[in-house]
Image (tube, helix red, strand yellow):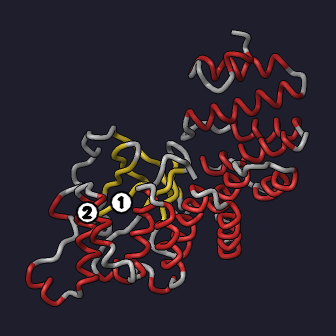
Amino acid sequence: MSKSGPSVSVGPRGAKVTAGPRGTRTTVGIPGTGLFYTTASKTGSRPASNSIRRQSQTPSLGFLKRLVTPDDHEALIDAFVALSRDDEPTALKHLRRAVHLVDGAFLAGCLSLKRGRYADSVRYLKTASQSPAELDRLFSQYGIDATWELPISDDVVARIKPSLRGSLLALVEAYQRLNRWQDAVDTLRRLRRLEPNDIIIKLSFAELLMTYPSSTPKICRRVVRLADGVANESSAHAALMLYKGRALRQLGMPEAAYQVLTAALRRRKDRSVELLQALRYQRALASEELGNHSKARSDLERIYSEQSDYEDVADRLGL
């Protein structure tokens, strides 16, 4: 997953705003894919649509309802109220009274991950994943949308809800931040058994493997297998093809890498500049390894014209 960190959507079901490391975003889903394209506004600016975030839509409990609502349920609601006001420390304070609830553990795990409290995040998310049937029960009871978003790139995010899949995906990120590589791998293997064709899970696994401290041929072969049969259908698919291209290069197959990367670059609409640059850079390296320096230079010049300080592009161009 992207190291820019997770963000949270708060509010009643169907009405929410997302606030994260890159500011406020409105999100448009692609039905049936689990992928979302986002439009961003800088931190401190207003959302694109003011109907998305209104204080009257914030989950809350009236005085009379508080009299009959269990204290731990009340704490869960108060945590959402604090999140809607961007007051994360107060939200965590409330959640400490609700982490024995499965939904409370999920929310506390995601928020701890965002706050950099990775050991706490692991503890809470493991609690949530041990009772998957209970996940989202209380949130649904109170009409709350507890969606979290984990960025895959600047434009595509994986949306996770209180579910076993969501808990385990967030848990992988927490393990990775703690350099607990084997725990992260084991968790992704569990996810793969649950949903073997999920593109987000495949992409998460490929990224984890390619950032592993020692990239061995065995790891590269596993990344290639993860991308078997993947076509360039979305940014997530293209990102997985990027990892496949890198793995093929490391396995000493630059021609195969060039073909995969070229296929990923054929569709550029709705692809972020960052993803396209990464694809071109890897293709340039493959071209150099094939001895086709003119093609390599063409890709490097394109990258340099967009971002002159990208990687070692300037040095490779002799500038």
The residue positioned 23% from the left and 71% from the top of the image is 78
Residue 252 makes an appearance in the image: yes
Q: Nearer the viewer, mark 1 or mark 2?
A: 2
**In which quadrant will I find the C terminus?**
top right
User: Dot 1: what SS?
Assistant: strand
Q: Residue at x 87, y 41 (%)?
A: 256
Residue 23's spot in the image, x, y percent?
35, 43
Q: Which mark is residue 199?
A: none
In the image, is residue 55 above or below residue 133? above
Q: Which label's residue is closer to the chain start, 1 or 2?
A: 1
x 57%, y 70%: residue: 168
In the rendered view, does 174 fall on the left or right side of 188? left
Label 2 sits on a secondary structure element that is helix
| Whole-percent x, y for residue 25 in the image | 36, 47
Q: Is residue 236 above or below residue 286?
A: below
- The kind of residue on which mark 2 rests is Thr
Q: Residue furthest top?
A: 319
Give percent across and percent down for residue 66. Answer: 14, 83
Q: CA distance from mark 1 to mark 2?
A: 17 Å
Front position in the image: 60 or 209: 209
Location of mark 2 (residue): 90
